[in-house]
Amino acid sequence: MTGPALSCDDLPFFFDPLHTGVARQARTFAAAWQATESDAGAETRRAVAALAEAGLTRWCVPEKFGGAFVGRPEGIDVRACTLVREALGWADGLLDTAFAMQGLGSLPITLAGTDAQKAAYLPGILDGTRLGAFALTEPEAGSDVGALQCTARRDGDAWVLDGAKTFISNAGVAGQYVLFANADPAAGRRGITAFIVEPDDAGFAVEPLEVIAPHPIGTLRLTGCRLPADRLLGEVGGGFKLAMATLDAFRTTVAGAALGMARRAQDEAIARARARHQFGQPIMAQQQVAAALADSATELDAARLLVYRAAHARDTRTDRVSKEVAMAKLFATEAAQRVIDRAVQIHGGLGVTRGVAVERLYREIRALRIYEGTSEIQRVIIASQL
């Protein structure tokens, strides 16, 4: 494989001139990336360092701190981040996650942090010396964010946090956790408040989890975790709005990662269908195989149109674009699952063999239909806007 066929030329109406350079840079980086079988935490650190060296992490950080200028207060260009994730998803799921978490783990600070907080945490995100994490999900609060049970209470000049977070990416390797707790449980979601937690804080512990694809992920335990007052992020009670603003910006990029994974599976499937001979001819000549590839190609193009329509709307419009974003994530992730499944089928027994690209992709794609809003939640969002 020579690299992802990533281009802005086929959808010029969704992009600005700068995006051509972003696509080229991301494509070059992805084509050269060599994944290893090392520990997921160590591999994530290596990936973030490489992304920083290549200048790709600048799309996660505002211009004031050395990042990219996008002309929006959010500090990120959604089209650029989506292009980057499309390329990284083609190359390696763990590499894509490493980039995504640099954005998710820092955007709340960009949006709501004080100048001192931004100066303390954003430069490390840019240069790769500090890994980010976004801690929202709990054992009993996933899609229903308002049900989170982690609490925060004032104690003199400090905040004390108690509770648990789970399925937190970069658990155990992050240098900063943007964590959401309820400072007024009786107020429900209006009490949710954001904090910055560091791994050495007393009362903070990590329990690793094993998932189907290599990934540093775990449960966070907070037992009387005491934070200085300057770790409060934004306003008390402003956490729910901050979390939703962050997810709204990055949800489209999840769909971009799904595009990249699906494109890689299609590339692998075409190569296999050309090389594999049965009954005296390449299996690509068989109508059922050709039809499967045609369906995948059509779904890929349809998904890409939805994804970059949403990214363009997110970058250029001032009104809410929740419906467009939800459609993009829903269709792209579900279509990617189908495309990858077809690629596995075309590979036959080889498709379920450890070490083969489509087998890895089959494991990597599954989580994208769950995190940052399940497919079911995306349908709820879409229906609410009809």
Image (cartoon, rainbow, N blue to C red):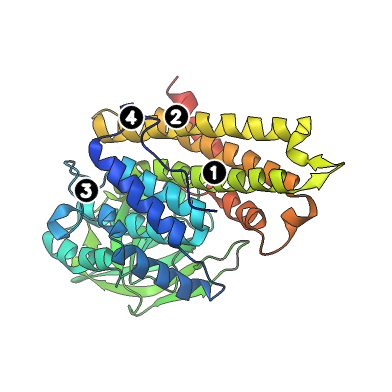
Where residue 270 sits, quadrant-wise, is: top right
Give, as a three-letter code, the residue at label 2: Leu
Alpha carbon distance from label 4 to label 2: 11 Å
Give, as a three-letter code, the residue at label 1: Arg
Query: Residue 322: percent from the left, percent from the top?
Result: 38, 32
Left or right of 271 on screen, residue 80? left
Query: Residue 332: percent from the left, percent from the top?
Result: 52, 37
Residue position marked by numbered label 3 in the rendering: 75
Residue position marked by numbered label 1 in the rendering: 263
Kindly indicate whether the residue at mark 2 contacts the one at mark 1 (C-beta within 8 angstroms). Answer: no
Kindly indicate whether the residue at mark 1 contacts the one at mark 3 (C-beta within 8 angstroms). Answer: no
Query: Residue 10: percent from the left, percent from the top?
Result: 40, 30
Residue position marked by numbered label 2 in the rendering: 305
Question: In terms of sequence position, does the residue under pointer 3 or pointer 4 come before the other?
Answer: 4
Kindly indicate whether the residue at mark 1 contacts the one at mark 4 (C-beta within 8 angstroms). Answer: no
Q: Secondary structure at mark 2?
A: helix
